[in-house]
Amino acid sequence: MHKIYLIIVIGIAFLSSCEKSPSIEGLWIVKSVTIGDEEMTPDARWMRFNSDLTQESGNGWLQHSVGNWKLDTETNSLTIVNKNGIDDPNEPFKITLSNNEMIWQRTEEGQNVIIKLETTLRLPSTSGDKLLGLWKLEKAVGKGSYFSTSNVNDDYLFFRWDKRFIIGTEKGRVHGVYNVHGHKPEVELIPYGTQYERDFWKIDFGEKAISLKLLNTDSIVTRKFIRIHNFPQN
C-alpha cells in the first residue's frame, strides 16, 4: 500500500512539472532583431521581467528604461510599457516561448519584426563597457591625431564612465567626449577645442588589449593599447 501511495505522489508531481509552462520572468538578452530583410540587432540589449509585472531594460551595464509588462496567455500577446519612454503605437508582440528561448513577432509600418531572446544570468557588456578604463599605447602605425609614432612608451588613453576621455602624451593632454556606436564596435572621439577634429575608430578587442583603426582617412592608421591600472609618468 505504501508503494502504491508513493507511486501516485510521484506521478502527480511529474504531471504538475509537465503542465508548468515556461515563464517570461527573469533576465533576457536580445540575440537578434530583424526588420523586414534587414538585421538591426542592438549591442548587448537586455530586458528583465519581474514577478510583480514591472520590467527594466538597458544595453550592457546601463539601465535606461523602466515600466510594466502584461502577457495575455490566451492570445500569447505581450504588451510592454516604458514609463520614461515614448508611447508604442504598434500592436502587442505575439510571443513563442520555449525553455530558455523566446521569439517576439509583430508588424511595424508594414514590415515584419522578429526579435529573438535568450535567458541569461548576467548583464551582457557592450563595446563601450569593454572600453572603460586605462590603456597604454603599445604600437602606432601611420600618422594621425593625438599620438606620436616615434615615442609610445608613456602615451595613454583613458575612457571614463561619464563618456569623457583623456589622452596623455609627451606633448600634453587632450580632453574630450566619446560616443560608442549602438550596433557595431566603433567609437567617435570628440576633442574639446579646435586643435583636433573628431575622429571615428573601429575597435578590435583582444585579451586585455584593444586595437583602434582610424576610419575617416584614406591611409592606414592604427593604434594598439594594453590595459594598465596606473597612469604612466609623462
Image (cartoon, rainbow, N blue to C red):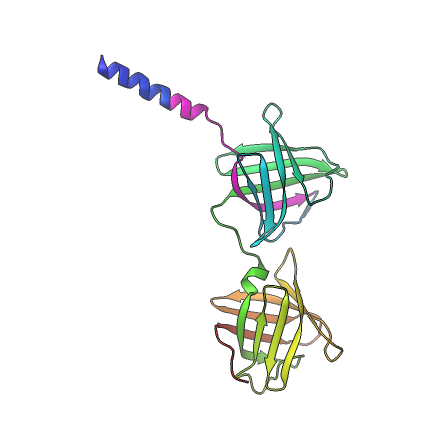
Quadrant containing the C terminus in the rendered view: bottom right
Quadrant containing the N terminus in the rendered view: top left
Q: Is residue 231 left or right of residue 34?
A: left
| Residue drawn where x is 66% and y is 66% of the image | 178
Whether residue 122 is situated above or below residue 168 in the rendered picture: above
Q: Quadrant of residue 18?
A: top left
The magenta stretch spans residue 69: no
Relative to the observer, which residue lies in front, 115 or 39?
115
User: How many numbered callouts?
Assistant: 0
| Residue drawn where x is 53% and y is 73% of the image | 135
Percent coordinates x, y for residue 214 in the rendering: 65, 72
Toward the top, the furthest residue is 1
Q: Quadrant of residue 180?
A: bottom right
Q: Quadrant of residue 66?
A: top right
Relative to the observer, which residue lies in front, 199 or 202?
199
Whether residue 129 is situated above or below residue 121 in the rendered picture: below
Relative to the observer, which residue lies in front, 53 or 131?
53
Percent coordinates x, y for residue 106 in the rendering: 68, 35
Range shown magenta: 14-35
| Residue drawn where x is 58% and y is 25% of the image | 73
Whether residue 138 is situated above or below residue 76 in the rendered picture: below
The magenta stretch spans residue 33: yes
Percent coordinates x, y for residue 77 in the rendering: 63, 30
Percent coordinates x, y for residue 2 in the rendering: 22, 15
